[in-house]
């Protein structure tokens, strides 16, 4: 019995070591840390840091939308909102919102003004552009559309978190099962079979 216990323990340790070497943390596909713009974080950094922080996360995008809601509730116009929100959220204007505001004040058409947004940010800001367009062209209040946009993005983020949590649970359970299975067979199943065979 002692030999089987030592053998099962050795197999368990060996499988755990193989798992730790063969499956690096990157396989877990966990989301990376939040990527904030330098202007939003309130401090500068090197060029490498700036290049790594050019994409808005879902939480940052929701914050941006809510800042617009606050500005609109104060009665500000779209160009003024773009300027003030940019000064608070993105002091270096990496998103190009102040360029959009300047273009709108010059009478540039809506779509052409938003072409001032850098290409790398245009994808994540397109939904914001669409939510504000009816307010600019028809004079409608954009608050309801912005609130709906923020809610949908939060729901999407919660769904993504649930999916990642489920994947993490499965990936953590697999090595645990692989480690305990040989121990269970050697300590529980084999002695029982041997005992029944001896009785027979």
Image (spheres, grey):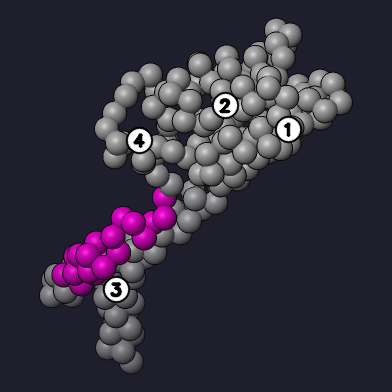
Q: Earlier in the sequence, mark 3 or mark 4?
A: 4
Give the Cα distance between marks 4 and 1. 29 Å
**In the image, which disc is placed on residue 195?**
none
Q: What kind of element bears circle 3?
A: helix
Residue drawn where x is 39% and y is 64% of the image? 174
Q: Is 27 inside the magenta-drawn segment?
A: yes
Give the Cα distance between marks 1 and 2. 12 Å
Q: Quadrant of residue 159?
A: top right
Q: Which residue position holds label 1? A: 110
Give the Cα distance between marks 1 and 3. 66 Å
Q: Is residue 76 left or right of residue 33?
A: right
Q: Closer to the observer: label 4 or label 1? A: 1
Give the Cα distance between marks 2 and 4. 19 Å
Q: Residue 117: where, in percent of width, then height?
A: 57, 36
Residue farthest bottom in this picture: 200
Q: Earlier in the sequence, mark 1 or mark 3?
A: 1
Q: Nearer the viewer, residue 109 or 23?
A: 109
Secondary structure mostly taken by the magenta-highlighted segment of the chain? helix
Q: Which residue position holds label 2? A: 99
Could you classify mark 2 by the number of other residues whose Cα lies within 10 Å: few (under 14), some (14-19), or many (20 or more)? some
Q: Residue 142: where, in percent of width, then height?
A: 77, 24
Q: What kind of element bears circle 1?
A: helix
Q: Is 37 inside the magenta-drawn segment?
A: no
Q: What kind of element bears circle 4?
A: helix
Q: Which residue position holds label 4? A: 50
Does the image show residue 5? no
Labelled pair 2, 3 in contact (Cβ < 8 Å): no
Labelled pair 4, 1 in contact (Cβ < 8 Å): no
Start-end of magenta stretch: 10-30
Could you classify mark 3 by the number of other residues whose Cα lies within 10 Å: few (under 14), some (14-19), or many (20 or more)? some
Task: Relative to 101, say whether 70 is above or below.
Answer: above
**In the image, which disc is placed on residue 182?**
3
């Amino acid at each position: 019995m002692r030999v089987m216990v030592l053998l099962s323990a050795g197999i368990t340790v060996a499988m755990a070591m193989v798992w730790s070497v063969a499956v690096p943390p990157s396989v877990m596909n966990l989301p990376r840390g939040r990527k904030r713009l330098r202007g939003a974080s309130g401090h500068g950094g090197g060029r490498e840091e700036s290049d790594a922080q050019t994409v808005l996360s879902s939480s940052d995008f929701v914050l941006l939308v809510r800042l617009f809601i606050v500005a609109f509730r104060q009665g500000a116009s779209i160009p003024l909102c773009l300027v003030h929100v940019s000064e608070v959220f993105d002091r270096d204007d990496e998103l190009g919102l102040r360029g959009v505001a300047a273009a709108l004040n010059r009478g540039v058409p809506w779509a052409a003004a938003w072409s001032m947004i850098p290409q790398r940010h245009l994808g994540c800001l397109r939904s914001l552009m669409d939510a504000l367009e009816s307010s600019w062209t028809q004079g409608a209040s954009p608050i309801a559309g912005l609130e709906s946009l923020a809610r949908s993005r939060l729901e999407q983020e919660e769904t993504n978190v649930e999916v990642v949590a489920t994947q993490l649970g499965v990936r953590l359970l697999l090595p645990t099962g692989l480690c305990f299975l040989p121990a269970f067979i050697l300590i529980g199943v084999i002695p029982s079979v041997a005992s029944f065979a001896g009785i027979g």
